[in-house]
Amino acid sequence: ASLQTLHLASLAHSQINMAMGAGTLATGAVFVSQPSEGLATAALMTNAGLTSALGYHMTSSIGGADMPVVITVLNSYSGWALCAEGFMLDNPLLTVVGALIGSSGAILTHIMCEAMNREISSVILGGMGTKSTGGETDMSIYEGVHTEINVDQCVDALNEADSVIIVPGYGLAVAKAQYAIADIVAKLTKQGTKVRFGIHPVAGRMPGQLNVLLAEAGVPYDVVEEMEEINEDFNDTDVVLVIGANDTVNSAAIDDPNSIIAGMPVLEVWNAKNVIIMKRSMAQGYAGVENPVFFKENTDMLLGDAKQTCDALSAKIE
């Protein structure tokens, strides 16, 4: 079974979490007070049940847009738990390894929160205290018809462009299309086209994932730029090729103050002359919100598997 990416909506979720937290502390206190064997067993089992329920309820109350941050937080928690176990067992190795895992997870969490313009307390508390309510407004409903193109039309656009920016996302990582993209970059560069990559800090599932994949495929480091470096250049770009990215190029983060991703820094691809978005379908991204960029006049959708499509593009670009 799999969990839904939509958060668990409950008006009293904070009160429920506090109640279960208090119950966990109480049963823990009973257990360490050295009661009878039967009472200690009951306290331990109750504590285990409450902590499991608390972990599930707290995590389920967090929306899909914040889930990558939650993953790094839980990773950090596991490290600190291992560190505590090392202290209890007087095992320096467990203590050191746990501290390394815990601190690296905490640093990664901080980086992702900065990139998403979120506070860690707001994420863990399930959106409590955030500026965005994510409520339904007229701005959250996007009307219009998207435009679809085929591989040949995409090839023509790339061949005619003087400057191209490629924005990869998690879809590229899943499809393992980095090698096909590297071939496309090499061919376009040979033609004299200026090709660069725009990488969002949380593209993929963690910072640096796309950078590693591109480096693995042999893409030169000097054409891979971070969001802050490249955002101002979209206005002067002929074609932006978005591959498997959605929330990181969603204009609702800027235009819709009621969006659940409002305030999140994004790659402003819609400012380019032509935007070509490669996706499997018109489905929503990880955050579960619509992307109005799909329906803009300068956007074309190239639907299909990223690797198969990139292989087809590479084969037709000379």
Image: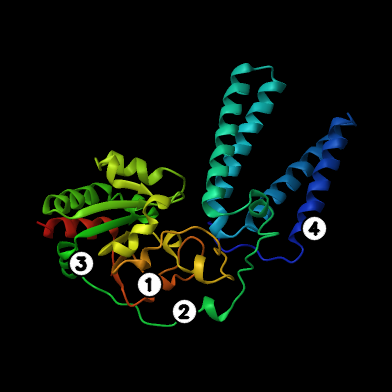
Q: Disc 1 and disc 3: Cα gap in Å?
A: 16 Å
Q: Which residue is mark 4?
A: 15
Where in the figure is residue 151, as x and y percent of width and height? 19, 66
Residue 162 lies, with reference to residue 258, above or below; the image says above
Q: Are marks 1 and 4 in contact (CB under 8 Å)?
A: no
Tell me the crowding category of disc 4: few under 14, some 14 to 19, or many 20 or more residues within 10 angstroms, Cα based. Answer: few
Going from N to C along the chain, the mark reached first, 1 or 3, is 3
| Amino acid marked by disc 1 | Phe
Q: Secondary structure at mark 1?
A: helix
Q: CA distance from mark 4 to mark 3?
A: 53 Å
Q: Could you say which is closer to the camera, residue 89 or residue 256?
A: 256
Real-space CA distance between mark 4 and mark 2, rounded to the nearest whole angstrom: 35 Å
x, y percentage for residue 156?
Answer: 15, 67
Distance from label 1 to label 2 (Cα)?
10 Å
Q: Secondary structure at mark 3?
A: helix
Verify CB contact (< 8 Å) between mark 4 and mark 2.
no
Q: Where does label 1 land, which residue? A: 294
Evaluate if marks 4 and 3 touch, with contact meaning CB atoms under 8 Å apart.
Answer: no
The disc label shown at residue 154, or none: 3
Judged from the image, the secondary structure of the residue bearing numbered disc 4 is: helix
Residue, disc 2? 142
- Image quadrant holding the C terminus, namely bottom left
Query: At numbered mark 2, what does the secondary structure look like: helix, strand or loop?
Result: loop
Cβ atoms under marks 1 and 3 closer than 8 Å: no
Dot 3 alpha-carbon crowd within 10 angstroms: few under 14, some 14 to 19, many 20 or more = some
